[in-house]
Image: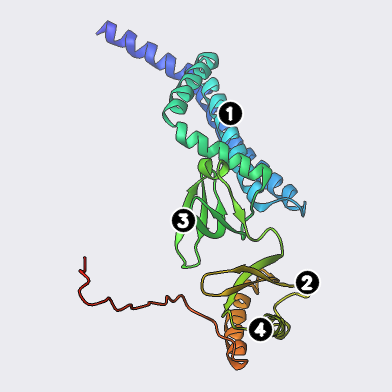
Amino acid sequence: MKDFDDALERLSEAVINFFPDLLKAIAILIIGLFAIKFFRWFMKRLMHRKKDMDPTLIKFSMDILTWALRVLLFVMVVGALGVETSAFVAILGAAGLAIGLSLQGSLSNFAGGVLIILFKPFRVGDYIEVQGEGGTVDEIQILYTKLITPSNQVVFVPNGALSNDTIKNYSRETTRRAELIIGVGYNSDIKKTKEILAKVIEMDEAILKEPAPIIRVKELADSSVNFQILVWATNGDYWQMLSDFKENSKIELDKAGIEIPFPQRDIHVRNLPEGTIKD
């Protein structure tokens, strides 16, 4: 019974001695969480004042900063409880190394996300083509970039592959050049065909006057004389301009009696002399 009383007394002393450290750790935790929240609010407000600051960069930076401060706060709380922080930091480092080795792909995506944020090959709202996928950038996350395709499908592209691949950004420049090929028959008047194509270009207000459109013969193909038409349009008018130009070209060439040929082949039938053995 005496041993039990002694053990209970030692436990009570330990609890009493530990209680101030516990209160200190709780106080550090509460104050730290409020400090992190205030610091995050202050930094976001400061970054938003800079008009040239990319919103994606702000979100990305705030996420990294918040997690770093939370880890620091956790170490401080553990230290306030009397745990040796140097040994604890070593344990965290070893655990971080083990996790890093097991998540090499995710770390590659994370590094890719950092490169995308820093060098800005595209921004939210740009239409890009990468990894065989094309779509509008909806969100740049830490590990993945979210695209919305023209058919309203959501595609998540890993940032690691994205940062190491060729990226076509169709939105970086405000204008875009189109190359159209129109074929006419060999019996067509080349000069007249050029005049009609120039008329079609003049009719379309979506086609820009500068840079000046170009019309020229590109090749003498098997069944047609192919004209190359190079015209410029804004990104917003580009696809509609392509459709309108093809439609109007067909209408105007038909009016002028100029044939737009389709692939065809002439077959010559030869009568064999009587008595010839067929294979």
Q: Please report the residue visible at 57 percent of the width from the left and 36 percent of the height from the top.
A: 111
Dots 3, 4 in contact, CB < 8 A: no
Q: Earlier in the sequence, mark 4 or mark 1?
A: 1
Question: Is residue 83 in sight in this rendering?
Answer: no
In the rendering, which numbered label is found on residue 140?
Answer: none
Q: Secondary structure at mark 3?
A: strand
Image vertical order of residue 13 relative to residue 155, above or below: above
Q: Secondary structure at mark 1?
A: helix
Circle 1 residues within 10 Å: few <14, some 14–19, many ≥20: few
* Amino acid at the residue labelled 4: Asp
Q: Nearer the viewer, mark 4 or mark 1?
A: 4
Q: CA distance from mark 2 to mark 1?
A: 61 Å
Kindly indicate the quadrant of the structure image that contains residue 142. top right
In the rendering, which numbered label is found on residue 212?
Answer: 2
Q: Earlier in the sequence, mark 1 or mark 3?
A: 1
Circle 4 residues within 10 Å: few <14, some 14–19, many ≥20: few
* Amino acid at the residue labelled 3: Val
Q: Position of residue 134 (x, y in %)?
A: 52, 59
Q: Earlier in the sequence, mark 4 or mark 2?
A: 4
Q: CA distance from mark 3 to mark 4?
A: 49 Å
Q: Position of residue 73 (x, y in %)?
A: 57, 30
Q: Nearer the viewer, mark 4 or mark 2?
A: 4
Q: Nearer the viewer, residue 113 or 216?
A: 216
Q: Which residue is mark 1?
A: 72
Q: Nearer the viewer, mark 3 or mark 4?
A: 4
Q: Secondary structure at mark 4?
A: loop
Q: Nearer the viewer, mark 3 or mark 2?
A: 2
Q: CA distance from mark 1 to mark 3?
A: 35 Å
Q: Position of residue 34 (x, y in %)?
A: 61, 41
Q: Position of residue 38 (x, y in %)?
A: 66, 43
In the rendering, which numbered label is found on residue 189?
Answer: 4
Q: Which residue is mark 3?
A: 155
